């Protein structure tokens, strides 16, 4: 099996090292989902969009930086992850925790600037993100935990969007949240995380970390990943139709097709995992234009 880690790092400038620590590209990867939430809420205020993106960056940066600290002991033992910044000492634990704290401050400041409900929901969403590194230590389904972290980006965008029409968020009812899209995104992420975790199957099983590949074996895990992606595509497309419109449903179906195709590619050969991973990076950007069209139509 090909060994590959997008989080590896070599000696670069300090700024570049910090950018790799917080994985700036992960924020870009998350932007379409927060934007979808904003569009479903019919938000039009550009300030709300900017504040939402700042909150998302703070949350993602805090989660990624803290993840490097929380997993340093495990990453040091795994040949695939042994080049990550905190493990190698390129970034110290103190630096990583300082970045985590600064990112959390940015996150809460942005949430407070959006509205009070956004601030109230900020804490549980932060705890969800920061607890992810510990999930694999206690149960075999950390993939669903990670999926929910990204899926809730849609929810966070929706809350911010609803606040854009009322500074108190008085029009916000959780029963109206786009849950089908939230759970569709969550299952999609869980599916490709199952694929990604097959690379650590032997390591996870040896030291007792939880994952579907460690529990059931790589072959069964890859088949489960395909099923998760099919279910995710169905939920996401149905949610897009119900909460947005026909254009969003079409582009969501296209995005789901790419996700399912990526999982089938990985099932065919684990050497295709890096390609499948990169295909999934495009999924949110494929789905997004339909939500924009429904908004302006």
Image (spheres, rainbow, N blue to C red):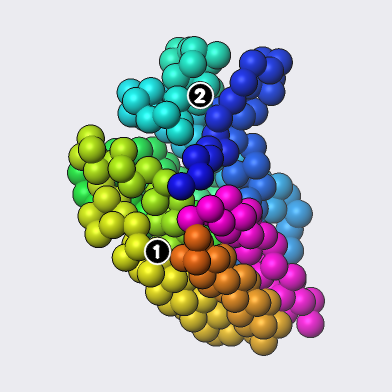
| Numbered marks: total | 2
What residue do we see at 52% from left, 83% from top? 238
- Residue 22 position in % (x across, y down): 57, 32
Q: Is residue 79 magenta?
A: no
Q: Which mark is residue 222?
A: 1
Question: In percent of the image, x 53 and y 40: which residue is there?
Answer: 4
Residue occupying image coordinates x 27% and y 50%: 214
Reading the image, the residue beneath label 2 is 83
Where residue 272 appears, x then y in whole percent? 56, 56
Residue 106: quadrant of the picture: top right
Q: Nearer the viewer, residue 118 or 147?
A: 147
Asked if the residue at tag 1 contacts the one at tag 2, i.e. Cβ–Cβ closer than 8 Å, the answer is: no
- Spatial CA span between label 2 and label 1: 26 Å
Image side of residue 126 versus residue 8, left or right: left
- Residue range in magenta is 270-297
Q: Nearer the viewer, residue 173 or 132?
A: 132
């Amino acid at each position: 099996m090909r060994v590959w880690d997008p989080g590896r790092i070599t000696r670069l400038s300090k700024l570049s090292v910090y950018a790799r620590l917080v994985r700036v590209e992960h924020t870009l990867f998350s932007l379409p989902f927060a934007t979808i939430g904003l569009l479903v809420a019919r938000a039009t205020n550009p300030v709300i969009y900017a504040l939402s993106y700042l909150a998302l960056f703070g949350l993602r940066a805090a989660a990624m930086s803290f993840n490097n600290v929380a997993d340093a002991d495990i990453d040091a033992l795994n040949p695939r992850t042994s080049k990550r910044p905190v493990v190698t000492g390129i970034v110290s634990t103190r630096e990583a925790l300082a970045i985590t704290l600064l990112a959390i401050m940015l996150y809460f400041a942005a949430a407070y600037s959006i509205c009070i409900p956004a601030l109230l929901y900020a804490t549980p969403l932060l705890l969800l993100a920061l607890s992810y590194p510990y999930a694999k230590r206690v149960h075999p389904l950390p993939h669903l935990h990670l999926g929910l972290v990204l899926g809730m980006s849609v929810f966070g965008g929706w809350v911010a969007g609803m606040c854009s029409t009322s500074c108190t968020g008085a029009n916000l009812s959780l029963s109206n949240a786009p849950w089908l899209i939230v759970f569709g995104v969550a299952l999609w992420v869980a599916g490709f995380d199952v694929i990604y975790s097959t690379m650590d199957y032997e390591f996870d099983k040896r030291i007792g970390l939880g994952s579907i590949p460690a529990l059931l074996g790589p072959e069964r895990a890859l088949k489960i990943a395909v099923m998760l992606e099919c279910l995710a595509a169905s939920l996401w497309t149905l949610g897009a139709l119900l909460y947005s419109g026909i254009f969003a449903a079409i582009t969501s179906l296209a995005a789901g097709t790419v996700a399912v195709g990526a999982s089938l590619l990985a099932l065919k050969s684990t050497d295709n995992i890096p390609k499948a991973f990169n295909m999934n990076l495009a999924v949110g950007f494929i789905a997004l234009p339909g939500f924009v069209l429904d908004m302006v139509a």
